[in-house]
Image (spheres, rainbow, N blue to C red):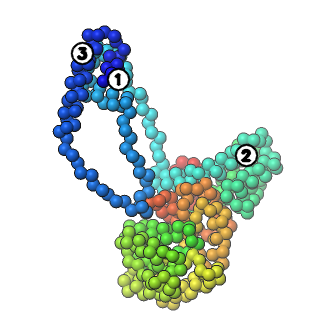
Amino acid sequence: MSIFKKWFSGGNKDEQKDDIVDEKIDEIVEEVADEQETEPELEAEAIEVPAEESTEESHEPEMPTEEEEREEVFSLDQEEMIEVSGAQEEIESLQEDEPEEAPAEEPTGLFGKFFKGLHKTRENILGSVEGVLSAFASIDEELFDQLEEALIMADIGVETSVSIMGSVRGRVRSERVTEVSGLKRLVADEISKILKAEDEFVLKTPTVILVIGVNGVGKTTAIGKLANKYKSEGKSVILAAADTFRAAAIDQLQIWAERNDVPIVKHQENSDPAAVVFDAVQAAKKRNIDVLICDTAGRLHNKQNLMEELKKIDRIISKEYDESHKEVFLVLDATTGQNALQQAKIFRESAGITGIILTKLDGTAKGGIVIAIKNELDIPVRYAGVGEKITDIEVFDSEIFAKALFAEEE
């Protein structure tokens, strides 16, 4: 009680006023205590959240500070306390609200998701470029070399970085650029050209999608997100668990099938992946399914065995479901940078890759790999993972990606 007395008296040493304040505080505290005693007890309901679905950090409720408790008691009978204490002006000054700053508007839509997800990549690429430019007062060959090295270190890759700077050198001469600051615009422009918009991707039906990729890149999760996306668009979906050699791969896909409420075709572990795809094709045809998504092995005994298995699956689809459209999506983990580019080159040798699903784009500074993939392999990125939720997969738009990368207005 001594804390509340001292605060409400505002430092006034008049004993008579102190006594009045003390009596009033005692009355308020007693009223609050009476109200708390009459409140009904609520039974706690235990809600169990599956670990895979819970994407937000849990926080323990914060206990109010001593100052917050004082403010709560004061707010119960504010006007009467001011009248009794005679310290109205002082208390009013304590209660004056500080002007609130208007929150900055967050970008929305696909641009907003890319803008937020590319935060680390944007800082990595633009920060490297700006760091180099700030160290030079004039344009010379050393500046070009430093910029080229900065792009390489930003995971854009050697071949692509050399190509970009070659074009920048030519434009500096032809456009007679003399200011160092003008190079940033040229670099951004050349990267945007590489990421020029592809033809709009439209998934035709019926379609069989083979999803390939090494273990650990998020292949099964990407399939689950795709199934959710297609189903939300009104398409019927069926899954095929053809990754039969990886431990628990079948069980993981089963969980995603249940979560999306879609059927799944599966065999026993270590069974023939091609046999699983054969049965899945028959089921898709019989049920007139719009999209069949096949999870395939990311690793067999060696690379040759893996590629031969993929070719076998491809022949089965062509023979048994010739009327369907076929897509081969390679899943790459954006956080692996140049390693992802090497994976794409290896798979391209034996699998007719039609598109790339780039996962974990929101959690890496190595998103510049998109530029290298497009420039060196000319394989379109079809989908990008921009979060942990089941809905966090988006059709990749290279134009919007470029704008978000360089923080341009949508």
Q: Secondary structure at mark 3?
A: helix
Q: Which residue is mark 1?
A: 3
Mark 1, secondary structure of its residue: helix
**Residue 397 picture location, percent across and down:** 54, 61
Camera-near label (2 vs 1) is 1
Category of crowding for the residue at label 2, using alpha-carbon neighbours closer than 10 angstroms: few (below 14), some (14–19), many (at least 20):
some
Residue 210 visible, this angle: no
- What's under tag 2, amino acid-wise? Val
* Residue designated by label 3: 20
Q: In the current view of this chain or complex, which residue is farthest to the left?
A: 38
Q: Residue at x 67, y 63 (%)?
A: 338
User: CA gap, disc 1 to disc 3?
Assistant: 16 Å
Measuring 49% from the left and 88% from the top, which residue is drawn there? 275
Mark 1: amino acid: Ile
Q: Which residue is mark 2?
A: 132
- 224 or 186: nearer the eye? 224
Q: Nearer the viewer, mark 1 or mark 3?
A: 1
